[in-house]
Image (cartoon, helix red, strand yellow):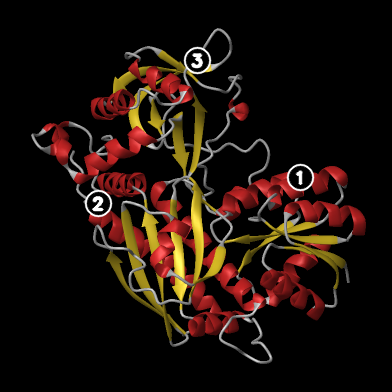
Amino acid sequence: MSQDITPREALIRLGASTAEAVAQVLEMFAPGGVQRGEVTVIADGTSPFASVARGSIASSVSYTDGVTGANIFVLTPTGARSLAGAMGAPAPDEPGPELSDLEMSAIDEAANQTMGAAAAAIGVVLGQAIEISTPDTRVLDDPASAADVYGTAPHAISTTFVIAGESCRLIQLVPAAFVVRVARAIDDRSAEQNGAGASIGGSTAGDDTPGADASPTTMALEEALGAISLRVWAELGRAHLPLGSALGLPVGAVLDLDRSAEAPVDLYVNGVRFARGQLLVTDDGEWAVSLEALESEGLRLLDQARAAQPEARADVEAESESLDLPPDHPIQGETSSPEPEETSPPESETPDVLQSAVEGAVK
Amino acid sequence: MARVLVVDDAAFMRKVVSDALASGGHEVVGEAGNGTEAVQRYQELSPELVTLDITMPEKDGLEALGEIISFDPSARVLMCSALGQESKVIESIQKGAKDFVVKPFQPAQLLEAVGKALA
């Protein structure tokens, strides 16, 4: 099955999902006072800060685990003061053009809470927990040099909001790998909803057609895989349950996963499913996976990434080489005990999408 | 009514939490802006309750929680999490936190969680 969603569509959906989560939190601060505008994909070569006025208040939060990328709220000083006031920050006795430390801290906290909600929303789409950084709030004295502060990314999205009568915007700097993850997650969900079976992220027969390799998504995937350190994990299955139920799980509780014991497990490399195999226990009592079906497209891209980076770090090389293994070659995990309760979940675990997995590298 | 240590990297949130606690008759005996300070202040002040933010610089709330519980296994800690930190909330409960409250919250919600943590 080929990928149905373009990078631009993925960006729009990412922006819309983020904006919805952000708006829900802002609505708690200013009930009835929040309006959400359109999501705009910033054209290539255009600075996302091109129209930001000097002296604007910018509060940034980055994704630090699960995905990467930066999110920058840009408000006018008046808008920032309105938002801080709506949150309960008292106005200074003698309000001047500059916000007080407490008002700046309130904006800091608004960014923290809104992006926490956005990270949760995106995490549901990706089936993985997304961690965020602590916020950084500052006055943008020179928006033209914003790239020096926030860096650059291949893609950028801008979403406008009106809070308590004042306009603000959320600028998202989105790495290529993030776009690929979103596109694949949406494609996977669409495939599941359409009953199309468990094809691997659209990298089967459909992509073998001439020209498929030159698609923006494929190019982005190549770029992403060529630049990142690899982490391999196996997924046994998934279960969905509310946070309340997860918190109430007693020791000894049995959580049913959506896959039979005989079914193969999926192998992932940095979120890209590249193979399936059977879970084994070695003579040393360690988990291992015997590969049964390779995803040729994923492996080809991984080979390209390795070939393109002869000077890559040793750990990347070591893990990349493991991907040359033929079917039936066991890949061993880092966990040392075959006891189920000793199996470590991936760092990507979320309460509503619990994944039992063995994460590791080839030894 | 309890003696409470309030921990959050945002001065604004420390004020919000402190004001809510004061409105419920609790005494805020100290504040901390990161996990390192939180552990130090806990050892100095021996509060009856800690409200502990999760995402903080230097040392986050989960690390601080572990050190506080190691120092005082009977410590009563209430986690203050943002939306989207459910996995960390679960981890914090497993590490010994008494309860949690999700930001943004109303004072009544915080006071209810405080009451549960102190019960």
SS for dot 1: helix
Q: Is residue A8 left or right of residue A321?
A: left
Q: Is residue A104 left or right of residue B115?
A: left
Q: Is B61 rendered above or below residue B119?
A: above
Q: Is residue A86 left or right of residue A20?
A: right
What residue type is disc 3 on? Lys
Q: Say if labels 3 and 1 share a chain.
A: no
Task: Look at 70% across and 45% down and name the residue there.
Answer: B94
Dot 2 corresponds to which residue?
Answer: A7
Which of marks 2 and 3 precedes in the sequence? 2
Task: Look at 38% across and 67% down and name the residue there.
Answer: A144
Disc 2 from disc 1: Cα separation: 42 Å
Disc 3 from disc 2: Cα separation: 36 Å
Res A101 quadrant in image: bottom right
Task: Mark 3 and mark 2 in contact? Answer it, CB < 8 Å.
Answer: no
Q: Is A40 rendered above or below residue A184?
A: below
Dot 3 corresponds to which residue?
Answer: A363
Subunit that carries the residue with mark 1: B
List x then y, in percent, for residue A221. 29, 39
Q: Is A322 rendered above or below residue B77?
A: above
Looking at this view, name the residue that lies furthest to the left. Answer: A210
